[in-house]
């Protein structure tokens, strides 16, 4: 692919002066429109060393309002040791721009493969990352700046001979030039495997700066115009549709028409299971001490652990979390209660805040409600469209898969109680001053919607209970039984992950 590019293409100075100014004006207007349409944009610059990334980024941002964009310079993961503490894609999730803003990347997540070639699984993770952003409304523009081997060598010599720029040329740059032909093959493979309809590559012939600048300006303008057109912006009669690739909706084997069944998984749960008080008092401290010992082993092994709690209102999530953490070292875990997203969180992809809260290597992250809100409350209450919550199953499985491959131990609990037990707990909360804050009008309203929540929960568990992140249903009518089961399962998962069982 790269070998077939015509690097002799040029643009003379007079043509550049004729074409560039109107393009800049157009881009300035499009940035303002994108801001008004709350359309987030990601622009990636990859390419050879000395191919002019910095210069061409300056050409792009010249007509833009600096309050509406941010330029990220991405070092290799080896430089900042990021990969030692979190999954590969976490730092890039945190760099994604909020709605209406532009994120410009001088180098990007493609460094994960370019700097130290890895398996194509990394390219698969990158493609799923870009697809998820696209489906959430992001416009993704990717440039690869291409120059020939001789041209690169010539530019490196020029940089090295100038005292103000010699620092930019190290032994690595010269070695990379010597291995140019091998790198071309790697780049072809990366570009071909990640060139998708939702995030296509644009190859830029960069021997001539003026030609490259105009190509970049015009490409960005066209992509912004297309994105605004999809949203029906400036067309009051059109409702802004989501830019969704239809074949990705429900493509995991459970189509909208084919997936329909009466809830049975939760109805068949044996809620009569109990743990007597004497047994509970004896088992609880033993289980807590074992989990504390495993916490230190997880830390020494640098293995993060993710524990997510979902379930009916008043099912006892808080009580289970309290007993789970009671004897843990507080320096090594974090409890994250998940409420409705705030304005800043809503300005990002819905998974953004969970990537941000992912525990550091060797630490435990505990979530009182989680990313599964997308396919539970957001589905039932209509906060997410059907296409949004249907594609969330694959998005969540992909995210958890990346966490697992990084080394995370993932435990997911669904706490189940019956209607009579929930009613009794609601009434107790209403009568107890110390528990009044736990009960709201919304909790009462949700009781009427439980059949719909149960249907959503069943589908959620069927679609997202994977070999690496299975669901555990906890019979929670009896609080002592539920607390012991949660501790026991967390211990088993940690022991399995550490190879101790």
Image (cartoon, rainbow, N blue to C red):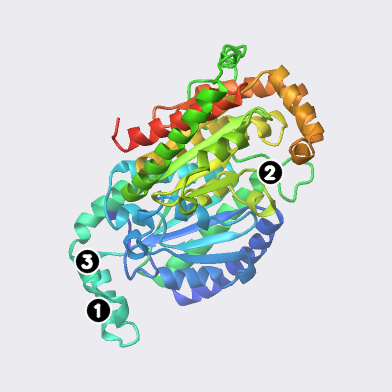
Among the two numbered marks 3 and 1 on one chain, the one whose residue lies closer to the N terminus? 1
Q: SS at mark 2?
A: loop
Q: Which residue is mark 1?
A: 157
Task: Identify the image quadrant of residue 62.
Answer: bottom right
Q: Which residue is mark 3?
A: 177
Q: Is residue 395 left or right of residue 420?
A: left
Q: Is residue 421 left or right of residue 73?
A: right
Q: Is the Cβ of the residue at disc 2 closer than 8 Å to that at disc 1?
A: no
Q: Which residue is mark 2?
A: 340
Disc 2/disc 1 C-alpha distance (Å): 55 Å
Q: Residues within 10 Å of mark 2 (few under 14, many from 20)?
A: few
Residue drawn at (32%, 52%), measured in percent from left and top? 113
Q: Residues within 10 Å of mark 3 (few under 14, many from 20)?
A: some
Q: Is the Cβ of the residue at disc 2 closer than 8 Å to that at disc 3?
A: no
In the rendered picture of this protein, how many numbered marks are placed on residues? 3
Residue 372: x and y, percent?
A: 58, 34
């Amino acid at each position: 692919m790269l070998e077939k590019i015509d690097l002799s293409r040029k643009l003379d100075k007079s043509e550049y002066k004729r074409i560039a100014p109107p393009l800049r004006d157009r881009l300035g207007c499009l940035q303002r429109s994108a801001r008004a349409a709350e359309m987030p944009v990601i622009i990636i610059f990859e390419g050879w060393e000395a191919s002019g990334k910095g210069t061409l980024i300056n050409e792009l941002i010249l007509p833009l309002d600096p309050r509406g964009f941010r330029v990220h310079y991405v070092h290799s993961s080896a430089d900042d040791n990021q990969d030692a503490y979190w999954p590969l894609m976490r730092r890039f999730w945190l760099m994604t721009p909020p709605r209406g803003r532009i994120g410009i990347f001088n180098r990007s997540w493609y460094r994960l493969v370019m700097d130290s070639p890895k398996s194509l699984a990394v390219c698969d993770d990158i493609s799923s990352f870009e697809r998820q952003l696209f489906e959430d409304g992001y416009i993704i523009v990717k440039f690869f700046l291409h120059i020939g081997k001789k041209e690169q060598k010539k530019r490196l010599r020029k940089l090295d001979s100038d005292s103000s720029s010699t620092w930019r040329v190290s032994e690595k740059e010269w070695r990379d030039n010597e291995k140019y032909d091998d790198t071309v093959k790697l780049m072809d493979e990366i570009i071909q495997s990640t060139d998708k309809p939702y995030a296509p590559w644009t190859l830029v012939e960069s021997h001539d700066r003026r030609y490259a600048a105009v190509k970049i300006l015009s490409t960005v303008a066209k992509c912004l115009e297309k994105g605004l057109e999809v949203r029906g912006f400036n067309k009051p009669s059109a409702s802004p549709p989501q830019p969704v690739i239809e074949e990705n909706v429900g493509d995991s084997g459970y189509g909208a028409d084919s997936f329909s069944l009466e809830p049975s998984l939760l109805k068949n749960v044996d809620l009569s299971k109990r743990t007597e008080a004497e047994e509970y008092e004896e088992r609880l401290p033993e289980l807590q001490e074992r989990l504390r010992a495993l916490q230190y082993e997880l830390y020494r092994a640098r293995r993060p652990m993710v524990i997510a709690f979902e379930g009916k209102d008043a099912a006892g999530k808080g009580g289970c979390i309290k007993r789970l953490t009671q004897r843990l070292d507080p320096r090594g875990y974090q409890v994250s209660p998940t409420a409705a997203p705030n304005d800043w969180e809503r300005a990002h992809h819905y998974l953004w805040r969970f990537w941000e809260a992912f525990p550091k290597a060797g630490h435990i992250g505990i979530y009182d409600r989680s990313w599964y809100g997308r396919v539970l409350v957001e589905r039932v209450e209509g906060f997410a469209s059907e296409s949004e919550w249907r594609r969330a199953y694959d998005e969540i499985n992909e995210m958890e898969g990346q966490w697992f491959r990084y080394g995370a131990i993932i435990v997911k609990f669904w706490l189940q109680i019956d209607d009579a037990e929930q009613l009794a707990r609601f009434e107790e909360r209403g009568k107890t001053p110390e528990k009044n804050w736990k009960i709201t009008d919304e909790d009462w309203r949700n009781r009427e919607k439980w059949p719909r929540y149960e249907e959503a929960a069943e589908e959620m568990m069927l679609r997202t209970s994977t070999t690496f992140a299975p669901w555990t249903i906890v019979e929670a009518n009896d609080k002592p039984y539920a607390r012991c089961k949660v501790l026991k399962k967390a211990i088993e998962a940690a022991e399995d992950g550490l190879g101790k069982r």
